[in-house]
Amino acid sequence: MEFRTFVFYFLAAILVVAGLRVITARNPVHAALYLVLAFFTASGIWMLLQAEFLAIALVLIYVGAVMVLFLFVVMMLDINLDRLREGFWSYLPLGSIIALLMVAEMGLVLGGNYLGLFEAEVPQTSVDHSNVQAVGRLLFTDYVYPFELASVILLVGIVAAVALTQRERRQSKAVSPSQQVFVKARDRYRVLQMPAEKKD
């Protein structure tokens, strides 16, 4: 067995175990940490396939941003685990159907690849060829309009999130110069007359 094949099977075994622990761990923080391990292992498999851009993007975006956010949310929220487990059996039939469909799809793809039904193969990159450079060239030439459309959609999502969080109009602390000019002295202060108190 070659070293490359051994590394692939080693990473694949870790990925499968980490994926199973994500859905079977009782503690949500442990499940999130197993998901971080699964992302790191998947990025290692991407590196074996010479897809450096996808591997680095998986680590930087999912592990560095999304999973850190998940961990903060899970640790800050007081999650009632018993209440979450109450509706597990009601979602089991639908979850089983979706899981079987996913297994069937992966079986078709992997079986077709091993049986040689797919004509396209993974291109082997040369030493002077950069995967990131090829992705960047395609992104800003052939797919520049979908890329810009995705950026506009993300901008609309950011604006919508800010608009949804500010439902009530806050009291503005801005001053009006026209009202300040016409203010008179008697409007600025008031003289109060209070009766004197005698102490015994």
Image (tube, rainbow, N blue to C red):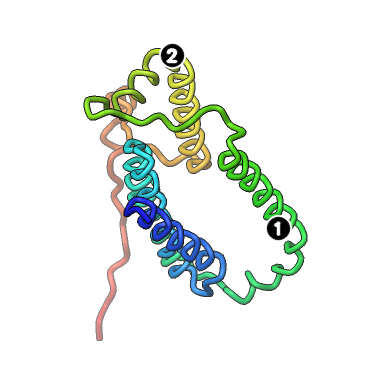
Seen in the picture, residue 105 relative to 13 is either above or below; the reply is above
Q: Which mark is residue 95?
A: 1
The x, y position of residue 151, in whole percent, is 43, 25
- What's under tag 1, amino acid-wise? Gly
Residue in view at x 49 percent, y 73 percent: 27
Seen in the picture, residue 154 relative to 99 is either above or below; the reply is above
Alpha carbon distance from label 1 to label 2: 38 Å
Q: Residues within 10 Å of mark 1 (few under 14, many from 20)?
A: few
- 187 and 176: which is toward the camera: 176
Quadrant into which the C terminus falls: bottom left
Seen in the picture, residue 43 relative to 16 is either above or below; the reply is above
Residue in view at x 49 percent, y 68 percent: 28
- 173 and 9: which is toward the camera: 9
- What's under tag 2, amino acid-wise? Asp
Q: Which mark is residue 6?
A: none
The quarter of the displayed image where residue 90 is located: bottom right
Name the secondary structure under disc 1. helix
Quadrant into which the N terminus falls: bottom left
- 188 and 65: which is toward the camera: 65
| Badge 1 vs badge 2, beta-carbon distance below 8 Å | no
The x, y position of residue 172, in whole percent, is 38, 37
Residue in view at x 32 percent, y 42 percent: 56
The quarter of the displayed image where residue 67 is located: bottom left
First in sequence, mark 1 or 2: give its number.
1
Q: Which mark is residue 142?
A: 2
The x, y position of residue 186, in whole percent, is 30, 37
